[in-house]
């Protein structure tokens, strides 16, 4: 009896499975399908007016706002400002974070000294530094940069240290018994061996960095996407806020698709050290 | 090529990280291997056979005694003692060719020569055509072929093998045992071969050294009088092989190999736990 009730259900499920298997093979559906669903829900909510118009708006209005912000040159200028800040902050953050991560990870004495300090300062999250930074450096690019550097650094350091600790000991032993000295071991074994950790640290670090940038721009900014959004909030311009949110999402999507994912595909995925992120 | 190995009254104690007691794994292990001899080290699980190999490799320092290679006391790992690991320990980011050539690169051999020799070694171990593959694209058996090739590419006078076939399926294992003997015979380095497989120890070796329970000492040192080259087809029915197998299994106090396997599995996990808890060295 139970067998007869199960059969139609399984047939139905396998039909769905086949549908998805075919649908997901089309690249356009795979990438844009989820967004199309989101768009439909958005339109439905906007058209139904369950949320008052003062709090919510429809895709067309957002699109028109987007076009006008570009035509007036506001969005390109603000986006440019944000990108420069992100780039400068991330570059310093990556350099300092990677160097410091390896130093703390590899040297026992450095680690003993810095580990408690790292844990302490990690707790003082990015924007918690803003009040004191504003007192020291004013509403300046320096303050924003420091916040980004600070944010990018910590996840990077911590994931590099754990990648070094998690490296199979036999790889270092093998290198040593093949005649590799300390520096050769560092260059040919530790650096590539910790690449999965480094790349996931960069991913996390940059993600946090972008968020910190937007938060900093909202609080102390005079330009930038974060400033634009917070400014629009003051004017009650919901569409402009939405534009800012969408730009941020697209920006991260591009960073992932154009930089992070191809890098991982060529290195750690090719070497079979990690599975593709989110794939 | 020399390669005489003298294991001189080794002992190894450690402090248990949980109970804080001092445990003695290796009591007093003392034996020598003349140049070019293939010697297996077997013993009950937990007797410290791998510890002895790690000391010979220079990975860990003994609490007492010393290891002497050609009149020189061992203090650190070195290319004169190539190591083949149970988990292969191939570099995942290097192709098979780059893995095999790594030791030559460390020695400063020019690139074109490295490439030629790596290709020759790949051919010798039966990996011809797989030079540009990454380790994760190979089967376990092929990975260990690469592991052996990587060691022999530098022509070490001593090769240390730590249960090299333990994580390879039973059928491939027999093929690989014959293959490794064939490859070994081309260079004839001195070999210290750690295993818990009695049949494997007899098949591979000129001598089998048996360690006792911890704190371990050498319980027996048995010469294997079987002609080379050996194949499983000939060896498995040879009276000498059967006699030695019975003798060694009795020494280990078990009826058959299965009991050894189970005890070994239990011990491996305990050992891994200890190593993890006692910290690790970094370059």
Image: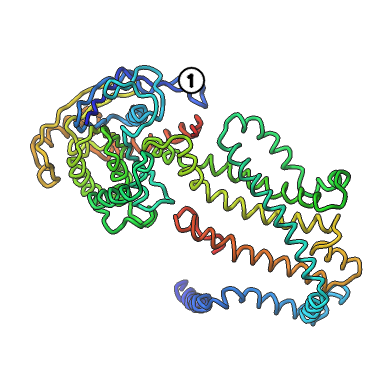
Please tell me which residue is depicted at 77% across the width and 79% down the height of the picture. A63
**The one of B238 and A95 positioned closer to us in this rendering:** A95
- Mark 1 closeness class: few <14, some 14–19, many ≥20 residues within 10 Å: few
Please tell me which residue is depicted at 73% across the width and 69% down the height of the picture. A247
Please tell me which residue is depicted at 78% across the width and 82% down the height of the picture. A60
Q: Is residue B276 above or below residue B183?
A: above
* Residue B48 found in image quarter: top left
Number of marks in the image? 1
Left of B132 or right of it: where is A227?
right
* Residue B157 found in image quarter: top left
Q: Is residue B228 above or below residue B170?
A: above
Left of B141 or right of it: where is A193?
right
* Residue A255: image location, x then y, percent: 64, 63
* Residue A249: image location, x then y, percent: 70, 66
- Say which chain tag 1 marks: B
Left of B179 or right of it: where is B238?
left
* Residue B143: image location, x then y, percent: 33, 50
Image quarter in which the N terminus of chain B is found: top left
| Residue pointed to by mark 1 | B21
Question: Is residue B87 visible to the viewer in this orientation of the structure?
Answer: no
**The one of B226 and A61 positioned closer to us in this rendering:** A61
* Residue A226 found in image quarter: bottom right
């Amino acid at each position: 009896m139970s067998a007869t009730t199960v059969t139609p259900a399984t047939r139905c499920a396998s039909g769905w499975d086949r549908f998805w298997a075919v649908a997901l093979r089309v690249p356009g559906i795979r990438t844009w399908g989820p967004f199309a669903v989101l768009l439909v829900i958005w339109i439905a909510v906007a058209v139904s007016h369950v949320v008052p118009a003062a709090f919510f708006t429809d895709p067309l209005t957002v699109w028109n706002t987007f076009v006008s912000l570009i035509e007036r040159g506001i969005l390109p200028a603000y986006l440019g400002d944000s990108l420069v800040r992100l780039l400068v902050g991330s570059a310093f953050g990556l350099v300092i974070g990677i160097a410091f991560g390896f130093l703390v990870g590899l040297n026992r004495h450095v680690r003993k000294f810095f580990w408690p300090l790292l844990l302490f300062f990690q707790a003082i999250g990015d924007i918690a530094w803003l009040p004191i930074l504003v007192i020291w450096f004013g509403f300046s690019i320096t303050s924003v940069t420091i916040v980004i550097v600070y944010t990018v650094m910590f996840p990077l350091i911590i994931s590099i240290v754990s990648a070094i600790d998690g490296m199979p000991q036999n790889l270092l032993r093998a290198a040593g018994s093949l005649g590799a000295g300390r520096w050769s071991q560092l260059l040919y074994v530790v650096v590539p061996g910790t690449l999965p950790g480094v790349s996931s640290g960069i991913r996390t670090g940059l993600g946090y960095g972008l968020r910190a940038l937007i938060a900093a721009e909202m609080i102390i900014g005079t330009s930038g996407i974060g400033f634009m959004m917070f400014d629009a909030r003051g004017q009650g311009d919901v569409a402009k806020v939405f534009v800012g949110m969408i730009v941020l999402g697209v920006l991260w999507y591009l960073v992932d698709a154009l930089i992070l994912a191809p890098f991982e595909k060529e290195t750690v995925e090719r070497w079979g050290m990690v599975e593709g992120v989110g794939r | 090529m020399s390669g005489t190995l003298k294991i001189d009254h080794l002992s190894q104690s450690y402090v248990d990280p949980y109970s804080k007691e001092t445990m003695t794994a290796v009591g007093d292990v003392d034996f020598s291997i003349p140049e070019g001899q293939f010697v297996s080290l077997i013993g009950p699980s937990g007797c410290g056979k791998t510890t002895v190999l790690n000391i010979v490799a220079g990975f860990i320092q003994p609490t007492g005694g010393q290891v002497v290679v050609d009149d020189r006391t061992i203090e650190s790992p070195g290319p004169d003692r190539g190591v083949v690991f149970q988990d292969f320990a191939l570099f995942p980011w290097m192709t098979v060719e780059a893995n095999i050539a790594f030791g030559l690169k460390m020695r400063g051999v020019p690139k074109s020569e490295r490439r030629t020799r790596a290709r020759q070694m790949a051919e010798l171990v039966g990996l011809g055509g797989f030079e540009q593959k990454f380790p994760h694209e190979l089967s376990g058996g092929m990975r260990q072929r690469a592991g052996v090739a990587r060691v022999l590419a530098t022509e070490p006078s001593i090769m240390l093998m730590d249960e090299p076939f333990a994580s390879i399926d039973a059928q491939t294992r027999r093929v690989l045992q014959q293959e490794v003997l064939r490859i070994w015979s081309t260079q004839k380095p001195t070999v210290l071969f750690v295993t818990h497989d009695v049949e494997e120890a007899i098949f591979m070796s000129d001598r089998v050294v048996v360690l006792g329970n911890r704190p371990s000492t050498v319980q027996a040192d048995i010469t294997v009088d079987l002609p080379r080259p050996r194949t499983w087809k000939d060896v498995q029915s040879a009276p000498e092989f059967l006699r030695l197998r019975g003798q060694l299994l009795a020494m280990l106090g078990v009826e058959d190999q299965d009991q050894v396997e189970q005890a070994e599995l239990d011990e491996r996990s305990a050992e891994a736990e200890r190593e993890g808890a006692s910290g690790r060295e970094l370059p």
